Amino acid sequence: MDLEPWNPWREFERVRAEADAIFERFFQKVQKSDPGRPVAFFPTTDLIETSDDLRVFMSLPGVVEEDIDIAVEGGVLIIRGERESPYDQGRARSRVTEWRYGFFERRLELPPGADAERLSAKYLGGVLTVVIPKKARAGGAGAGG
């Protein structure tokens, strides 16, 4: 018999964990990356367009900078990497688990006019920022015509 009072927050957490597990199993079946590895999680990402460039902000707390790979293939920005667990998951008993560990990959289609050759990236405070300048428009300012 459970003598602990009912806690609606604990019930919400249980339902959320079940939903997370369902989505995780689904994405592992349908989402395989080019290297053929199952994707463990999808980092929170913003793709912002300004008049001068495209900016990608990706939340990657706990990811080591050297474990991040950035490439552009066929007009698609590909960011992949891995976040390792800070504890031995085989020996530890989880009480609450909200973070996801393992391989991740995000593919973002770049619009025409993105100058991927001049891509720059920085990783600071767990946030990856990728800046992709736009190509100069023909006939615009500085075109010499």
Image: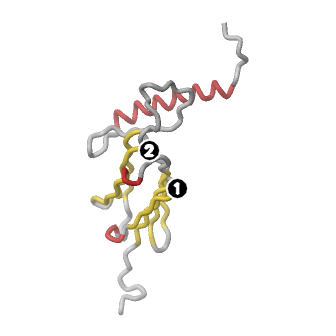
Disc 2 residue type (three-letter): Phe
| Image location of residue 8, percent across then percent down | 69, 25
| Residue shown at the point (44%, 44%) measured from the top left | 42
Q: Is residue 136 left or right of residue 2?
A: left
Element on which disc 1 rests? loop
Q: Residue furthest bottom?
A: 145
| Image location of residue 81, percent across then percent down | 37, 48
Q: Residue furthest right?
A: 5
Whether tag 2 and tag 1 are in contact, CB under 8 A, the answer is: no
| Residue shown at the point (73%, 17%) measured from the top left | 5
Q: Residue furthest top?
A: 1
Q: Quadrant of residue 16?
A: top right
What's the distance in space between the residues labelled 2 and 1, CA to CA? 18 Å
Q: Is residue 116 left or right of residue 42?
A: left
In this figure, which residue is indicated by the disc labeled 1?
A: 125
Local packing at callout 1 (Cα closer than 10 Å; few below 14, some 14-19, many 20+) is: few
Asked if residue 136 is positioned above or below residue 79 in the image, the reply reads below
Looking at the rendered image, the quarter that the N terminus falls into is top right
Element on which disc 2 rests? loop
| Residue shown at the point (44%, 62%) measured from the top left | 122
Asked if residue 16 is positioned above or below residue 82 in the image, the reply reads above
Q: Nearer the viewer, residue 93 or 99?
A: 93
Q: Quadrant of residue 24?
A: top left
Disc 1 residue type (three-letter): Gly
Looking at the rendered image, the quarter that the C terminus falls into is bottom left
Q: Which mark is residue 42?
A: 2
Q: Quadrant of residue 73?
A: bottom left
| Residue shown at the point (52%, 56%) measured from the top left | 125
